[in-house]
Image (cartoon, rainbow, N blue to C red):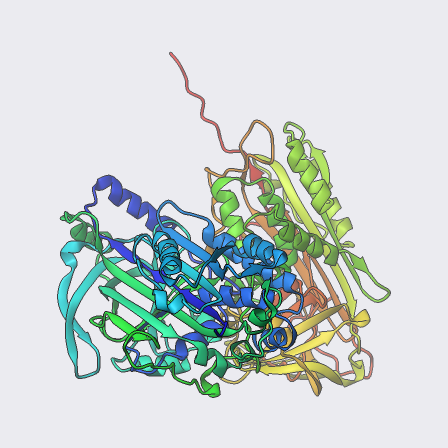
Amino acid sequence: MVSFLTIAIWCCFAYSLVEGAIDSNALNASIRDNEDDAYYPHPNWSDPFDWMFLKAFADSKYKNVILSPISLKIVLALLYEGSSGSTAKEFQNILLFPEKKQIVRENFYRIIQALKTQEKENVLNLGTKIFMDIGITPEQSFSAVAMHNYHTSIENLDFANGTASSAAINSWVEKLTEGKIPSLVSPDEVKDAVMLMINTIFFKGAWRHEFPKNRTQIGGFYISPLDVVNVPLMRTTDKFFYYESSALDAKILRLPYKGKKYSMFIILPNTKAGLKTLLKKIDLDTLKRDFYYMDYVPVEVTLPKLKFDFKAKITNMLEEFGLRQMFQNTASFPGIARGEKNTLRMLYVTDIIQKSGIQMDEEGSTVYSSTDVQLTNKFGEVDNFFNATHPFMFFIEEPTTGTILFIGKVENPLHIDTVTMRNGGLSPEMPTKVPASTIPLSTDRLNLEPEIAGSNSIINRFNYFDLELLQEFSEANENVFISPASIKTTLSMILEGAKGKCAQEIGNALRIENIDDSETRKQLEKLLFDLNEKTASNELTTANAIFVSNKLKLLNEYQEKLEKHYSATIKPLDFSNPSKAVDEINAWVSNATKGNIPTIIDDNLFDESTLVITNALYFKGIWQTTFNPKETEIKCFEVPDLGCKQVPIMQKTDTLNYNLVPYLNAHAVEVPYKDNKYSMLLLIPSKGTNIKTLARDLQHSHFDNILDSLRPTEIILEMPRFEIENQLSLVDYLKPLKIQEIFGPNANLSGIVEKTNIRIGNIVHKAKIEVDEQGTKATAATAAVVIPLMGDTALRVSANVPFIFFIYRKESKNILFEGILLDPKISETTPAPAPDVVKSTPRTRHIPKFQNRQINLAQPRRIFPTYP
């Protein structure tokens, strides 16, 4: 008897659309759901393998396809746990699994934990089980890892008794899938097996926005531009996240399920025959960018009812991807089991089979008389229509980890079963071989390891806030200079005492799910560490302080957190004497910024103030290679709406890290400071791109991906000498990022002070930067919800058009300062250039006009009842 390891992966997705009667209470609940719906794309959403997996079944002979990438990844990770030698090396080389298996198992542990977190509105059953023949015994260490990290149990069966073994396996699958799959394997299929590894995933979800039954009608679905089949078409009108992608020539719609975890995305080509082209051109970067453009707007949706199964052998597909060793009789899996040597020597993978199913139907009550009218009246005339009446693709995601549970396509809703099994009476069909040119990989190797919210992911999340904040400022026709590091520090200090919706909004904006999480704490500590370092050539200093009314008392827990995690100074003040309080706060800020920001608070900002949170940041850096003042010349800088403006342009020839970033259509140049710990990154738009477009595109990019793409290049860098000084209120810039509740009367900051409620009156940010031939000098301060900034900028290649700049810590890639230069300004106090340098005309200092100049934590007014 030949011994072998058969891996059967079975995935079932049952998807139910609840179309029941909705009374007024239910309708109001639905409206509340609409108002609360929010979508923030995960920074590490998906990976290239998910899309390679789907592209392998792009051929039109597969009419309807549904696959589960995460199901396959879990089983491959389990195989890697038990592999060794060349088999393990192939997992590492092809799938980019780390050599240290502990990293892999921890990542999958986090994903599986997220998937097993239940919601009352939806059902997701995820299970993996290994069935071993009674003649072999699992390795104790493998059993422990499988159970703890992968929630996988091991059961011994007598495979010689095929009837009893198949019955045990089918019973487990039937229970997990709630009866959807009563029979997965036959007695003949398990008769010669040594081990079967089965993963099952079952999902049943109800729409957040129901499809009324009385709007479901028979209509035409174009299976080709000329051929139409009649199918039941469901319709609803509501607010959804929606975007029309010019890059994909398709519409993208997000359909959320009830609860706050799962969503289905449908990508509908604009042409009836466009699915084949869409599947060829679709790639991870384009999708990520498009998802950030999605708007929450009313959409009329038409969608066919679906019910089909898909069962496919995917062994050859994985071999085409380059994963071959495990399918040969030389495979090495010594870490899985122990037993008779000849049996274990023949342990290898013969088949990987995946079966999936999807059902979209009408479950629930049939009475639904008034909803159609109410939905129409609710939104009035709808401008957006999403008619999925021709082939489309779809996927279902779990947002907290960016994991795609299911992915597929629909070409003909009437096709119920698509089978590509070797056993089952049909001729075997193998997946299409995908040309390498169509696979959206950034490297030659494939990474199947899911990216989880470890330290790198948290850094990416923090940087997303920085880029989103910059995009909000880009709409103003003014120079911009801010310190996201300072702003995040202040918001984090507020988050420490925020509760309820206040905490949720700040956490969502900063991508902090739990501020007390160990990984989050590590990253915050790293950020604060980066903000306090002095070297022989550069100086970076930050200071945090809370000025609290002597009539209030900070909660001990809040005070301890600020002192422990932020090294914050707590200073009681008598706010009944505004002049003295203002002087003390301004003196503290002036001292922290080396006198560069002498004032941040005005007397008239202190009506009802009880608490002022301040952060001050000071940076002074010297270029690693300075610009020679003798080479500074008066040249043209293209100012928007004004044209050519003659300004001092510095110049140097140096080897700098550089790249023309194609997806931004911009030149990227890194200009380092001495000691090589800090750098300035310049992003200069290429022809055809303006600064506002660049800022919008930038928020959909990974900051560290831009840095990683740079390569040493000898260039002549030209950049203007300039300075920017801003004082502005952050309130109107934080509200579009969904930080709103802290400024309103219902703010819940009950974790800050005892026995009273407070709210944020304003957040004031003041920042200043000076860039010249020697280096950069930057300062910033923020009050009340205050974030002080200082920054330094260096440009390169001909920076004679508006550009974006960042100052960041090279090791951690934390962004300290960022800005947009539209018009180089030089203050009258700028030191004159050397005598032999062409002298620029003195210019007045420019301070953009913004509204309120500070941030106050004010007590809500109390209205006391009067009695006769």
- The answer to whether residue 331 is above or below residue 363 is below
Of all residues, the one furthest to the top in this rendering is 868
User: Residue 311's spot in the image, x, y percent?
Assistant: 34, 71
Total labels drawn: 0
User: Residue 291's spot in the image, x, y percent?
Assistant: 43, 67
Can residue 787 be seen in this snapshot? no
Picture quadrant where residue 465 is located: bottom right
Of all residues, the one furthest to the right in this rendering is 536
Q: Is residue 84 left or right of residue 270?
A: right
Q: Is residue 422 left or right of residue 447?
A: left
* Front one among 94 and 497: 94
- The answer to whether residue 814 is above or below residue 408 is above
What residue appears at the point 77 percent right and 68 percent down from the top-left corner? Answer: 677
* Front one among 533 and 54: 54
- The answer to whether residue 382 is above or below residue 551 is below
Q: Is residue 331 left or right of residue 584?
A: left
* Front one among 644 and 434: 434
Tell me the quadrant of the picture where the C terminus can be found.
top left
User: Residue 22's spot in the image, x, y percent?
Assistant: 21, 45
User: Residue 216's spot in the image, x, y percent?
Assistant: 16, 60
Q: Is residue 473 left or right of residue 784?
A: left
* Front one among 450 and 287: 450
